[in-house]
Amino acid sequence: MINEVLHTLPQVLIDGLTLGAVYAIVALGYTMVYGILELINFAHGEIFMTGAFVGTAILLTFAGFGWLASMPALVALVLVLVVTSVVTGLLGMGIERVAYRPLRNAPKLITLITAIGVSFLLQDIVRFIAELKNGNYILTGPSLFSGQIGIKVSSISSIFNDASVKSSFFIVLIVAVIMMVTLDFFVNKTKWGMAMRAVAQDRETAALMSVNVNKVIALTFFIGSALGGATGVLFAIQYGTIDPYIGFILGLKAFTAAVLGGIGNIRGAMFGGILIGIMEMFAAANLPVISHGVLGAEYKDVFAFAILIIVLIFKPEGLFGKVSVEKV
Amino acid sequence: MKNLLYAIQQNKRLQAIIVGLYIVVTFFSLYLAQKSVVAFLLLLSSLLLLYFTTFSNRVKWLIGGVVMVVLLPLAASQGEAYQSYMEVATLVGIYIAMALGLNIVVGMAGLLDLGFVAFFALGAYTYGIFATGQANNFMPFGHYPLSGESFWVFIFIGCFVAALFGILLGVPVLRVKGDYLAIVTLGFGEIIRIIFNNLDKPVNITNGAMGLASVQPPRLFGIDFMYPNQFYYIVLVILVTVIFAVRRLEFSKIGRAWKAVRENEIAAQAMGIHLVKTKLMAFAVGASFSGMMGVVFAAKQTFVDPTSFTLLESITILVMVILGGMGSVPGVILGAALVTILNLQVLTELTNWLNQLSLNGVINVPDALSPAKMQRFIFGVILILFALYRPQGLLPAKNPVFDEKDLKDADKLINAGVQKEATQHVHLDS
C-alpha cells in the first residue's frame, strides 16, 4: 500500500502544487478583505470565475481573428493577464462601492447576505452572457501551453513512478510566485501597504492619522480582485474547461486555506493554499488506495471541508494567526 | 386615502364586510374559473388581508382555518387543475415551515446558515431509506420497506436526526466566531449532498445518484395518502403546529435570549445568557423543523435524490426569510409563500408564455433568457436590494410594546396586597 502511495507521489506533488498555487492566490483575496473589513467576501470566488471567463473570452477573440497563432504565447498570456486583472479589479471595486460600503456600519449579518446576493448575481450574469454568446455556458478555451514534459523521477529512486507535467504548470507556478512576492513586497514595504495594514489594525485611528480609509479599502478590493481574476485565467489555461459555478466550491476551499493560515495573515494564506492543494490532490489520488476502495476520489471535497472543521476546533486562529480578543 | 384607511381601521364591521366579500368573490371566481391561477392566488391572499384586520387573534385563526381547510380545497376541486393547485399549496406549506425554521436561526438568533437544506435532506433520506427496500442492504434485522404507518413516527425521528446533526455541526463552529458559521454551513450543505451522492459503496445506503424511488406513502386507518390533496392536510396540521410552536418560542425565555444574542453577544453574556447553549438551541430547533418537513417531502414526492438538495435550495429559503422580514413570523410566512409561488407558478408560466410568443414568431427570446433559468439572478437581486434598502423585510418584526400605565396599575394592585391576577400587561402589537 505504501509502495502504491509512493509510486504516485511525484505526480501528486506536482498537481497539488499547481492547484495549491491557485488556492493560495484566491485565498489572498479573502484574507485581505477579511483583515480589513472583517467580512467574508463570498463574491470573491465568483470574481475568480469571472476572471476565468473574461480571460477565455479574450483568448477566443484573439483566436477568432487569427492573432493568437501569429503572436508568441507568452505575449498573449501577459496581455490577457493584464487586461483581465484590470477588469476584475474594477469589478471588485464596483462591488465594494455599491454593495458593501453603504452597509459598513450595518450588522455583519446584513453584509454577509449582500455578499451572497452579489455572488449569485455574478454567477447568473456570467452564465447568461456565456450562454447567449456561445449557446452553452461551459466554455473550453484555446490551449496556449499544451506541451507535455516527462520528468524521470524513477532515475532518482525506483520507488517513484515517472511524472508528467503540462508546460502550463510552470507558467501557473511562476506567475503565482511573482504575484505573491509582489503583493508581499507591496503590503510590507510601500506607503500604501502601510496604510492598508494601519486600516486593518484600527480603522478609526488610521483615519485620524490622515489615512483615506475609503480609498484604502477600495484599493484592497482592487488588488484582491485583480489577483483573483488573474488566477482565474491561470486556472482556465491549466484545466481547460470552465463553467460559471467553479467559483463556489473553489472559493470555499480557498477560504479554508485562509483560515488554515490564520485569517488576515497574507503569508499564512499562501502557505495554507499550497498545503490544502497538496493535501487535496493526495486525498484524490490515495483515498481509494488507503481505504481499499471504500472511499472514492469524490470525497476530496469532503476532505478539504474536514480540515476547516478540525482547524476551527483545535486552532481557530490558524497556523500563523494571533489570538484575537474581542474588546467591548 | 389615509382617512379612508383610518376609517376602515376603526370600523370592525366594515372590515368584516370587506374580508367576507373578498373571500366570497375570490372563492366563486376560482370555483367557476378553474384554470385561473390568478383566482387561486387571490383566494390565498385573503389570508394576508385577514392579517391586516384588527380582529382578535382567535377570530383571525378561525376565519383563516375555514379558508384553508374548507374553502380553498372546495373551490379548487371542481376541475382538472385540482391536484396541481393542491401540489402548489402543499409545497408552499413545506417551504413555510422550513423558512420558519431558518427564521429562528437567522432572524432570531442572528446566525447565518447557508446550508439549511442539508437538514431537509437528512429528514428526507431518513424516511426514504427506511420506507424503501434500501434499508435491507445494511440493517441486520427488521423487514423493509416499513409500512406507511411508520410515517407518523418518522416525522419525529426526522426532527430528532436533523436536530442531532445541527448540534454536531454547531458544537465546533459556534464556539468560535460567528462569521465562520456562514462558510462552514455552506460547506456542510455541499458535503451532505456529496456524501448522499456517493454513499452507494461499499454498502449501498443511499443508492447514490440514482436516488430512492417508490417511497411508501403514509397510511392512516388503512387509507394511503397518495395525492397532493391528501398531503395538503398533513402539511396544514404540521404547519399550524410549527407556527404555534414558533410563536410560543419567540416570546419565551429562550426566544428573548436569542434576540439578545443577536443584538449584542457580549452584552447578552453579561446578562447571564449562556452563548453557546443558546445558539445551539436555535440551531437545533431550526434544523428540526427542516428535518420534519424533509420526511413529508420524501413521502410526498415518493422519490428522493441528491439533486433536490443543492445550494440553490438553501439560498431560496434564505431569500424567503430576508424578503419577508428577519425575525418576523407573519413576514416569513408571506415571504415563503411569495417565493415558492414565484418559483413554481410565475416563472414557469412566464417561460411557457415566452416560448409561445417565440413559436408564434412575435418576439424571439433567446433560450439563455428564459425566466425559469433566472432564479439565481432574481434571488441575488432580491438579497442585495432588501439588504441595502429594506433590511427589515416586507412585514417587519414587532417586539411587544409594554404599556406603562398597565404596568403601574399592576404594581399598585400588588402593592395594595390585592391577590387578583393582573391581566395582560403585555399587548402584542399585531
Image (cartoon, coloured by chain):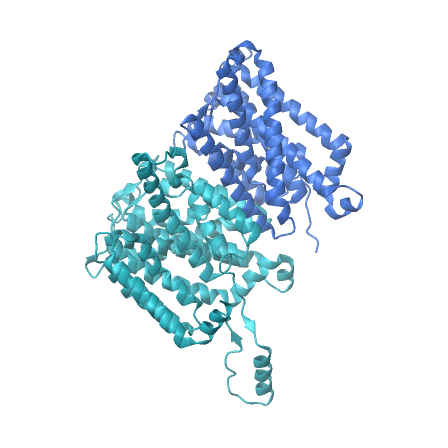
Residue at 68% of width from left, 45% of height from top? A323
Please give the count of numbered marks on the rendered protein: 0
Instruction: Locate residue B269, reporting x and y percent.
Output: 62, 60
Q: Is residue A191 above or below residue B213?
A: above
The front one of B32 and B108 is B32
The front one of A159 and B372 is B372
Residue at 34% of width from left, 52% of height from top? B91
The front one of B136 and B333 is B333
Name of the residue lying farthest toward the left: B222
Instruction: Locate residue B84, reporting x and y percent.
Output: 27, 51
Which image quarter: residue A311?
A: top right
Q: Is residue B209 above or below residue B322?
A: above
Instruction: Locate residue A250, reporting x and y percent.
Output: 52, 33
The front one of A152 and B303 is B303
The colour chain B appears in is: cyan
Q: Is residue A262 above or below residue B343?
A: above
Say which chain is blue: A
Q: Is residue B2 left or right of residue A259?
A: left
User: Does residue A16 appear in this view?
Assistant: no
Which image quarter: residue B48?
A: bottom left
Q: Is residue B116 left or right of residue A26?
A: left
Instruction: Locate residue A127, reporting x and y percent.
Output: 46, 33
